[in-house]
Image: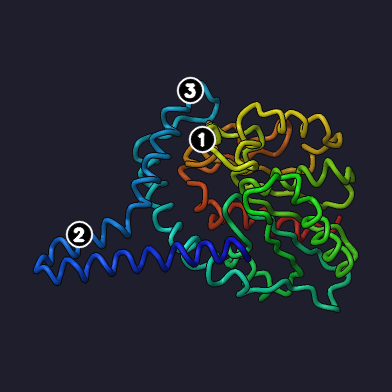
Amino acid sequence: MRLARIQQATTIGGVLLAFGWAVHALAEGRPFAAAGGALLISLAYAAVLALEFACLRLAHGDDPAPRPSHRQLLRAWWGEVRSAPRVFCWQQPFCSRRWPDHLPADATGRRGVVFVHGFVCNRGVWNGWLARLRAAGVPYAAIDLEPVFGSIDAYVETIELAVQAVERTTGRPPVIVAHSMGGLALRRWWAERGDLQRVHRAITLGTPHRGTWLARFAFSLNGRQMRIGSGWLQSLQQREPPGLAGALTCFYSHCDNIVFPPSTATYPGADNRHLEGVAHVDMVDRAEPWNELQRWLADQA
């Protein structure tokens, strides 16, 4: 809940700042400055996103993924501009508990799901998925990874408890869906527990499996662990169980404004799926990952 409180404070603070500026400017008889200033404060995040997209374009280099066109980048930027306020100013700060874990007593024999969110996120990012699964009667558990800015190693026990809860409820290994850093937390859990039989399928969305260029600017411990070629990533790879790639579906995009160059979000030997023109947070709302989850929920093997 710590992240929710932080994002509540930043959201309310931003609204008050924009409102305060507008009131001040109107009191001085400057209606255009009131509207313009409030709009600038409200949309400052869009400029930050634009900078991220410029960086991903410059850092693409010789990555084997197709280089995005300017039109694709613009479309992805607009998708992220629309998604970010909904996720970071509403779902996560105010609605992260809107859909509690669904672990009914009569779920034995059904396939369940565990959701693992990414960096500076919480379980609220999955609200759309949770609502649909609950309506369909699918058991699930969605976790919050805390401490927010601690080591990824610290998240192993949280994932373990969620997996155990779904295992007890269904009697079957779950499908695990992870976004961004959550995919690394999942891999760290796997390295610690070392049992591929406990996961029916793992689906990652925009996970920096091989790090991300943007992490060079990170100050938090988990952010530094996501740097390309970090010692933490190298150690993780050495500790992972054999055959992990065969259990993974990895979605990645050449327009991911957080994890780039694009192929850093792929895992060698896994079922790597490229999403064209899709940004980092907006990826959660795409049909392709949802359809992949449905495919594995229907698989009775």
Tell me which residue sits at (57%, 34%) in the image: 212
Q: Earlier in the sequence, mark 2 or mark 3?
A: 2
Task: Work out whether 281 lies above or below 123.
Answer: above
How far apart are the two marked residues, 2 and 3, measured between alpha carbons?
38 Å
Crowding near the residue tagged with mark 2, few <14, some 14–19, many ≥20 C-alpha atoms within 10 Å? some
Q: Secondary structure at mark 2?
A: helix
From the image, state whether disc 3 or disc 1 is nearer to you: 1
Residue 273, horizontal then vertical, whole percent: 62, 41
Residue 190, horizontal then vertical, whole percent: 82, 44
The residue beneath circle 1 is: 217
**Would you say 128 lies left or right of 195 here?**
left
Tell me which residue sits at (70%, 63%) in the image: 142
How far apart are the two marked residues, 3 and 1, measured between alpha carbons?
19 Å
The residue beneath circle 2 is: 36
Crowding near the residue tagged with mark 1, few <14, some 14–19, many ≥20 C-alpha atoms within 10 Å? few
Tell me which residue sits at (75%, 51%) in the image: 155
From the image, state whether disc 1 or disc 2 is nearer to you: 1
Q: Earlier in the sequence, mark 3 or mark 1?
A: 3
**Numbered circle sitting on residue 10:** none
Q: Earlier in the sequence, mark 1 or mark 2?
A: 2
Q: Amino acid at mark 2?
A: Gly
The residue beneath circle 3 is: 61
Tell me which residue sits at (34%, 69%) in the image: 16
Q: Amino acid at mark 1?
A: Phe
Q: Secondary structure at mark 1?
A: helix
Q: Secondary structure at mark 3?
A: loop
How far apart are the two marked residues, 1 and 2, measured between alpha carbons?
31 Å
Task: Work out whether 196 lies above or below 115.
Answer: above
Q: Picture quarter containing residue 220?
A: top right
Which image quadrant: the C terminus?
A: bottom right
